[in-house]
Image (tube, rainbow, N blue to C red):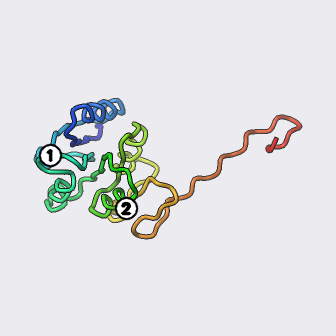
Amino acid sequence: MPARILIADDFDDNRELLRLMLESAGYRVRETRDGREFVEAARAEEFDVALIDLSMPVLDGWGALSELRADERTRALPCVAVTAFAAEQDRRRALEAGFDAYVSKPYRQKDLTEVIEDLLGRGGNPPDDRARAARRTRHAGQQDSDGHRPAPTPPPRPAPAFAGEDADG
């Protein structure tokens, strides 16, 4: 059965783009327009991952996350901050607040699906425990709040040499 994704964003175009990207990747999607609607949906149905815009009317993403984490029924729902706030301190603040991952706008479908698959335990970085998952970072070379660094990206391999040439040319 496809994973169920709950999304919260107050802009129709953003929700539609997210929905189209996620549905084309094989996920089932439920849309909400604000943090209050999002929290009600999360309490009423079972979802595998939530994508939450931080700046929304009625109840913003910060408040919605706080309500989810305070409720035993929704506490363990993996939540991704999806936001136009792209500065490092914004990413750090979101992870410290309890978001499991952070994706800044504009984003690519590949980035979204990698984060979701990691949170579902089907990606290249399966979650080991909630504390570590909450501090995951997608920025190479930066430490998370536990002092861990992501595995370094290996250098590119040299192109194969033609007969009589070495790899350097």
Seen as rendered, the residue at the extreme bottom is 147
Chain-order first, disc 2 or disc 1: 1
Report which quarter residue 136 is drawn in. bottom left
Q: Quadrant of the N terminus?
A: top left
Q: Nearer the viewer, residue 166 or 125?
A: 166
SS at circle 2: loop
The residue positioned 52% from the left and 59% from the top of the image is 141
The residue positioned 17% from the left and 39% from the top of the image is 32
Q: Amino acid at mark 1?
A: Pro
Q: Position of residue 165 (x, y in %)?
A: 86, 39
Judge left or right: residue 166 versus residue 147.
right
Seen as rendered, the residue at the extreme right is 164
Residue 135, numbered label = 2
Badge 2, how many Cα within 10 Å: few under 14, some, many 20+?
Answer: many
Q: Amino acid at mark 2?
A: Arg
SS at circle 1: loop
Q: Quadrant of the C terminus?
A: top right
What whole-number distance in Å separates the C-alpha atoms at marks 2 and 1? Answer: 27 Å
